[in-house]
Image: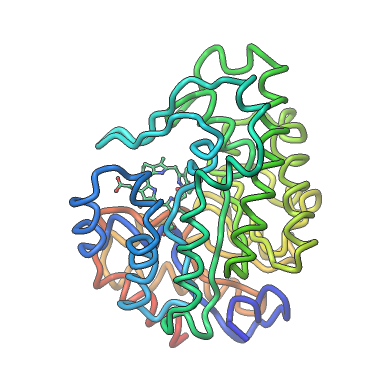
Amino acid sequence: MSLLNDVLINKKTSINPIWIMRQAGRYLPEFREIRSKNTDFIKLCLNPDLSSEITLQPLKRFDLDAAIIFSDILMVPYGLNQKVEFKKSFGPLLGDLNLKEMSELDEIDFVQRIFPIYKTLNLIKKNPLTKNKNIIGFVGAPWTLLVYMINKQSPKKQLIDTFYKDDFLLNRILIILEKFLKVHIKNQIDNGADIIQIFDSWAGLLDQKDLPNYVYIPTLNLVDYVKSLGVPVICFPRGIKDYKNYCDIVKPDAICIDYEVDPLYIRKNIQIPVQGGLDPKILLTDIKNLKKEATRYLDIFKDHPYIFNLGHGILPETNIANVEYLVKMVKDY
Ligand code: CP3
């Protein structure tokens, strides 16, 4: 059995498996080399040979316990026929959204638009490098995808003024997203993913009173669906204030915590397996500090089922020697 599942399913506390959010990506020179020759990011995500190669790159360098498929949460809006581009030093830029067209889209057309992603998973699964390792599939949570689809770019600190103007539109899109996210989850599992992570990167933008409608209910529906397929699900509601309430309502198999929450509070108040926490900026400091901060998380979660990870994606400027050190020290703990 692979190590992440030993924590997620068997609640084992004596091991600390490790993977790193955004492990396949911009801090690796071998990724940047492929990326420089492939300027269209969407096309790169739809190229199974290259996407599987990028997925495996971090596994060749580091003793990680899981591969996460190289893809993006915005492949779902793309599959729903909304234009998605990634602009250099700007990030994602989405086109106008046509609700009527989106409501009429059928499953076959959606799957056809993003089909190569499932081929990528197949290639990863077949590769000897993933033997005895977990393969993580993922989706964006409905709320975070709604943010990108309406805001049409990363919100940074706030949403566009008119974001909440059309309540009908927002709720219709949530329903459409739920339907197609389930399709995307099922296809990832059928093609080799044995864990699903749900990224809710913008959960922290919501007022407390809006969490039930935009976060709890739509995410709970997906969590129940993943569980019904017999696969563990990890949720990452970045920036929310009340992780305990989230876990009580959404009931994921594990909760991934961001770097702003107090790990001591989490250990005391949350019973399910925990993942992550370490501030990615710590990887930009020196080895001594890295050791101290990483050890703090390992010590706090010593008797708790815990998967080591960061509290958000690894930063592009991260030095590879520090990643090497971190993986080794977690393994040797
Ligand atoms: O290694 C992995 O984790 C797998 C690949 C992965 C990517 N994106 C590749 C990527 C995963 C899991 C994601 C998730 C994702 N994408 C999230 C949720 C996690 C988070 O960071 O909060 C979000 C919000 C996105 C949307 C997105 N994609 C943004 C905002 C950007 C631009 C900023 C950035 O991080 O680069 C992307 C582009 C993107 N997705 C890149 C990669 C490797 C960089 C592409 C490039 O080279 O320009």
Residue 318 appears anywhere in the view:
yes
> Is residue 148 left or right of 33 when viewed as pictured?
right
Residue 127 picture location, percent across and down: 43, 79
Q: Residue at x 71, y 41 (%)?
A: 179
Residue 92 appears in which quarter of the rendering? top left
Which one is nearer the viewer's eye here, 173 or 9?
A: 173
Q: Is residue 156 visible?
A: no
Residue visible at 71% across and 45% down in the picture: 219
How is the rendered protein coloured?
rainbow
Residue 188 lies in what quarter of the image? bottom right
Q: Residue 183 location in percent, x, y?
A: 67, 50
Camera-side residue of 56 and 332: 56
Kindly identify the residue that appears in the image at 33 percent across and 53 percent down.
315
Q: Taking 85 as reference, is 4 left or right?
A: right
Q: Locate the N terminus by quadrant.
A: bottom right
Q: Is residue 203 above or below residue 102?
A: below
Q: Residue at x 61, y 23 (%)?
A: 101
- Residue 195: image x %, image y %? 62, 66
